[in-house]
Each structure stands twice: as C-alpha cells, then as structure tokens.
Amino acid sequence: QVHLQESGPGLVKPSQTLSLTCTVSGGSMRSDNYYWSWIRQPAGMGLAWIGHIYSSGSTSYSPSLKSRVSISTDTSKNQFSLKLSSVTAADTAVYYCARIKWKDAYTMDVWGQGTTVTVSS
Amino acid sequence: QSALTQPASVSGSLGQSITISCTGSSSDVGRDKFISWYQQHPGKAPKLVIFDFTHRPSGVSNHFSGSMSGNTASLTISGLQAEDEADYFCSSYTNNSALYVFGIGTKVTVL
C-alpha cells in the first residue's frame, strides 16, 4: 500500500521561498505508471492544483503559479519536492502531495495527509 | 483556466439520492473527459471516489456513481448515509496542455 507524507516548515516569512518534501513509501517513484503532484487548499476554500512531475523529469505547472513554482524529484530517496518563491499571505494553505495514475484517466488516487503552511512575518 | 462550476451545497435525507453537477467547457471537461471526483471530510485529505467519470476505485461503495453529458459531469450518491456528509470536488485533466482544474466544491448535508 503506497503512502505519501508531506514535510517541511509550517511557517514561512513573506517574500521567502516555501519548500516542502513528499516522501513516498510502499512503492517506487521510478515507475512509469505515475506522475507526482502538489495541490493546495486555503482554509475554507477549494482545491487548487499546483503542478506535477513525471519519472522522466518533465513537469507541468498551473499557469497562475508557473513563474514561482518548481517541482523536482529525488528518486534515490523516493521523494519529490515543491519550491514556491516570493510567497505572500495568499499562499497560506494546506499543501497536499498526491500520486497521479495516468492509466486511470490521470486520476489522483493516493493523497498525503496534508501539511499546513502559514506565510507570516 | 477557470475553476469548474459546482453547486455550493446539496442536501438530502437519509436513504435518498442526490446528484452533484460539475460544469466546464469543451476545452476541459468536454474535451478528454478525464474526470475524477473526490470526497473530503473536515480536516481530512481528499479521497478518490470516481475516476474516468464513471469508474469506482476498489473499496469505494457502489452507492457512488458518475456520468457525463456534454461539458457536464455528475456524481450521484444513492441511498444517502450519514457518513456521506462531506465536501465533494470534481477535477478535469486536459491531455494536450497537461493541466488540471478542480471544481469549486459542493457541501453535501444529510438531513
């Protein structure tokens, strides 16, 4: 059973870079069957896709965040990471990592529990 | 890339059936029909309940069903149970642009 776990600072200062890591256990990130994604959810609001990465290293990002976001993988550690630069209070949210199963219509079939990030000085 | 349209709230009595709509455009929902539905209880991570607009993952109750017509996908919950009270989000993936978009979410209340 694959399990995803987010980790990283819960508090980031405005204008700094938010960095989160998702550790994948119970399965290999090297599999060609999956993409690996980040999604966020501000308090009381809906889900917002941030971006995803494939095993080849190819990425896709939300147009609204593309200039500030970077997703990378470290397959030796079975981890993938999110970096979001120049953060503001609007980036305060619960951040989720999720696995995308492209053979099942690109569905996000496994989710981490989420980690809360607050942007504040 | 606009959020998909869902009703803000839907309610039904125990045992009744409800349907939640998810409307997009021919550029997203209607294009590749890669539609998924997620259930989210308060303080919890989303859980997949429908993928490929009509398929249920293993372990998901068969009282969840999905369908599509044109640019609108729908999730039907038959025989409402107390544990179905949650937020529900649809999502659409567009293959040529490799972009996802989520619906705004629907709060389901079981009366």
Image: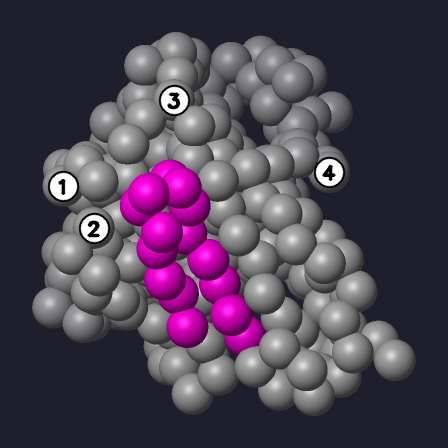
- Would you say the magenta stretch is mainly helix, strand or loop? strand
Residue hosting label 3: A26
Crowding around mark 2 (Cα neighbors within 10 Å: few <14, some 14 to 19, many 20+) is some
Q: Secondary structure at mark 2?
A: loop
> Magenta residues?
A70-84
Q: Is residue B102 above or below residue A104?
A: below
Residue type marked 1 = Asp
The span from disc 1 to disc 3 (Cα, nearest Å) is: 16 Å
Pinpoint residue B83: horizontal percent, then vertical percent.
65, 18
Q: Quadrant of the N terminus of chain A?
A: top left
Circle 2 marks a residue in which chain?
A
Circle 1 marks a residue in which chain?
A
Any magenta on residue B102? Answer: no
Pinpoint residue A89: horizontal percent, then vertical percent.
75, 79
Q: Nearer the viewer, residue B71 or A74?
A: A74
Q: Secondary structure at mark 1?
A: loop
